[in-house]
Image (cartoon, rainbow, N blue to C red):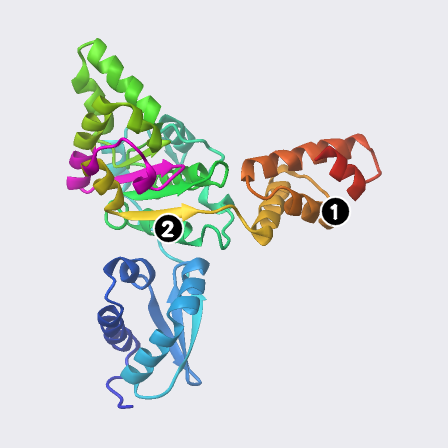
Amino acid sequence: MQAVVKDEKTIWKTTLAQIEIKLDAPAQFKTFFSETKLLRIENRTAYIGVPNPFTAEWLRTKYLQLIKSTLSYVYGEELEVDFTVYQKEIPKIPEEEIKKSSPILNLQNGVYGNLMDIITKACLNPKYHISNYVVGNSNRIAYAAAIAVIENPGQVYNPLFIHGKTGVGKTHLAQAIGRSIIERNPNKKVLYTTSEGFLNDMVKGIKTGQTELFRQKYRPVDVLIIDDIQLISKWVATQTEFFNTFNEMYNSGRQIIFVADRKPDDIQNIENRLRSRMNGGMVVDISPPDFETRLAILEKKAEFLGIYLKKNILEFIARTITENVRELEGMLQKVSLFNQLKGEEQLTLEEVAYII
């Protein structure tokens, strides 16, 4: 070991430079290291600041040894590493700039009064938020990619392709990305649609001779989210128009998010150039949640809805409904309704089993 410098900023800057070379994965480095900082070194322990708990867990699991060895070398002494979540400051947009580009905004006491109007106009479901998205082993990579896109839309993981079976939370995560981007900057134009919605708009434009209006609806948006993209394989003409839309958005640094029930290579009858574009960013899958994640989903949903059920009942539901999150949440509400009908008594496990 040989000490180089003792200043925290310089130590960490040097450490990150070496980690970036060793890692040799620009997207991974930008996602998980770019917003870290060395807070202090105390009692032979380096406290690394990270922007969120997930980044802390990911670095601890995947890159702890790399960070320890590199940091210790740069510092000149053997160090332990601990991760601390710091409060990230979100830059405020000047009110004049907001009014200039988005005159519909009503800013009162620092709160955007019609933020919900912007979310609705973007065709996003208000109930889908990143804060109520439960993260588990089945969706950690997808969640990490989502956070990276929220932090730097259009700059990393573009396009982001999320795939998985029905009811595993793909749409929730995709729309939560759009909402989070709007909350950070209401000037960002976000649009959620389905492949069928895209087709209908295109056909309408052709029939009315207003294809330019159709293009103006999609191409200027900052973030375009297209659900059920696998269905685009049915419409050849749509693929050509979409390919052109994709290229224009991509080349201008705008974010595109695809949601599908299968990965790009498994979508039949789509042009190779379009398949290549879909594979060109980050492709992540969401698997059916494991028991711990299903239980966490139930507990979070119950808390949100004001539902009280015994822990053993929630565990029973989580063990019984294993594949589909929507079915899981639906069963929670159904069991809760039957539980209310019993009055002061609580349902027994036998009764819950019968209901399911």
- Quadrant of image for the N terminus: bottom left
Residue sitting at x 27%, y 82%? 74
Mark identifier at residue 147? 2
Residue 329's place in the image compared with 140, above or below, is: above
Q: What residue type is labelled 2?
A: Ile
**What residue is disc 1 on?**
310
Which residues are drawn in magenta?
246-272
Question: How far from the left and from the top, in percent, is residue 130?
Answer: 45, 45
Mark identifier at residue 283? none
Whether residue 185 is visible here, answered yes or no, is: no
Image quadrant of residue 64? bottom left
Give yes or no for residue 263 being in the magenta stretch. Answer: yes
Question: How far from the left and from the top, in percent, is residue 218?
Answer: 24, 27
Lateral position of residue 193 relative to residue 128, left or right: left
Lateral position of residue 45 relative to residue 92, left or right: right
Q: What residue type is labelled 1?
A: Lys
Residue sitting at x 65%, y 37%? 332
Lateral position of residue 52 relative to residue 7, left or right: right
